[in-house]
Image (tube, helix red, strand yellow):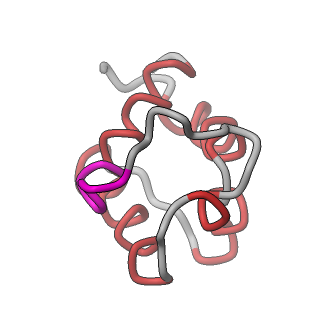
Amino acid sequence: MTPAEIRDAVLAILNTINPDEDLSSLDDEKEFRDQLEMDSMDFLDIVMELRKRYRVQVPEEDYDNLVSMNKTVAYLEPKMKDISA
């Protein structure tokens, strides 16, 4: 997957977790928690959806890499490079 495809995949996951959230003005630099109404369970849902949809394992010690869109895409890019969108 390309970085743009990974971003779209993460947006789809965020939309599944919180369908009422407006993601159109999401700032890729800012942390998700500063922009979206997310709690720790929502964050874990992101991790679980990544595993379910794309078979990507995110160990707990790597959770800090998923705090913003840019960090998430950069972290997932090598893990998802061989996955078709």
Q: Quadrant of residue 42?
A: bottom left
Q: Is residue 83 above or below residue 21?
A: above
The quarter of the rendered structure image containing the N terminus is: top left
Q: Residue at x 27, y 56 (%)?
A: 20
User: In the image, residue 17 lies at what x, y percent?
Assistant: 28, 61
The quarter of the rendered structure image containing the C terminus is: top left
**Relative side of 78 to 24, left or right:** right
Say which of 44 and 33 sits in front: 33
User: In the image, residue 16 lies at what x, y percent?
Assistant: 23, 53
Figure label count: 0
Q: Residue at x 24, y 54 (%)?
A: 19
Which residue ends up furthest to the bottom in the rendered image? Answer: 40
- 38 inside magenta stretch: no
- 17 inside magenta stretch: yes
Say which of 74 and 57 sits in front: 74
Q: Residue at x 63, y 68 (%)?
A: 63
Q: Residue at x 43, y 21 (%)?
A: 5
User: In the image, residue 29 lies at what x, y percent?
Assistant: 76, 41
User: In the image, residue 81 lies at what x, y percent?
Assistant: 50, 24
Which residue ends up furthest to the right in the rendered image? Answer: 29
Q: Is residue 79 above or below residue 2?
A: below
Q: Is residue 26 above or below residue 84?
A: below
Q: Quadrant of residue 64?
A: bottom right
Q: Which residues are magenta?
A: 14-21
Q: Quadrant of residue 51?
A: bottom left
